[in-house]
Structure formats: C-alpha cells, structure tokens
Amino acid sequence: VQLQASGGGLVQAGGSLKLSCAAAVDVFSIDVVNWYRQAPGKPREWVVSMTDEGITRYADAVKGRFTISRDSGANTVFLQMTSLKPEDTGVYYCDITWYGLDYQGQGTQVTVSS
C-alpha cells in the first residue's frame, strides 16, 4: 500500500499547516492511522491516531492544536496543525495498519521558526 505524506513547509510560530497522507486504499477501511514525527537527533514521537471507527487520540504535546480527519472520496487522511511551535519541527510520517499489516510512507518536513 502506497502512502504519501505532503503539505509540510516552513511556517512562523503561531502559524498553521495542513498535512495530507494519500493512501491507495479507502481510508475508512484502514484499521488505524497514525501520524508520527521525528526531530533531528531525537527518537520518533507518536503524534495522533485514528481508528476505523473514527476514534482519535492525541499526544499531550499537540492536544487542542492538531486535528486529524479523513476524506474517503480523496483516500486521504489530514493533519491540521495550528498554533505551531518551534518544538513541532520535524519530519512527519503517516503510518497505517490495514488488514493487520503496517505500512509507512515517506515523510514531509515541517519547520517552525521562532
């Protein structure tokens, strides 16, 4: 299953970005979708997840600022990020579990300047 994350870029602190994760499958058939991020020199950090039933969980660091959503027609999962902080900088990856198998796409760089 091909996944492609996009939408990253350079933004000032307090700004917003909307990331997309295009999947080659119906996003409503995905068991779980996760967004992770990795900052330079740091381990990968889980950010948010959504189940096939639409149940969402957010890391404390992003709760209230990030929102995950999905569009079946576009086979895409979105991550709306607002009130961005420099510590949100990193490469963002989407990862899915589909019929019991895990798939991960290439990441997209998010840089938040202070």
Image: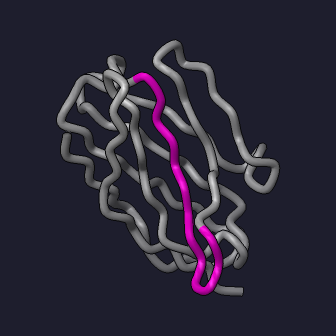
Question: What x and y, as percent, mark residue 107?
Answer: 38, 65
Residue 73 lies, in percent from the top left, at 24, 24
Residue at figure coordinates x 33%, y 60% from the top left: 6
Quarter in which the C terminus is drawn? bottom right
For image coordinates 44% across by 42% down, the residue present is: 78
Colouring of the image: one colour
Judged from this view, the residue extending furthest toward the right is 60
Q: Nearer the viewer, residue 16 or 19?
A: 19
Q: Is residue 55 above or below residue 70?
A: above
The quadrant where residue 36 appears: bottom right
Indicate the position of residue 74 as horizontal and vertical percent values: 24, 32
The one nearer the camera, 113 or 77, is 77
In the image, residue 45 above or below residue 98 = below
Residue name at image x 49 percent, y 32 percent: 69
Q: How many marks?
A: 0
- Look at the image and give the residue range highlighted in magenta: 31-43
Question: Could you say which quadrant of the image residue 5 lies in?
Answer: bottom left
50, above or below 45, in the image: above
Horizontal side, residue 51 vs residue 76: left or right: right
Q: Quadrant of residue 101?
A: top left
Residue 39, position as x, y percentages in the image: 60, 77
Q: In the image shown, does 92 or 20 lie closer to the viewer?
A: 92
Is residue 12 covered in magenta? no
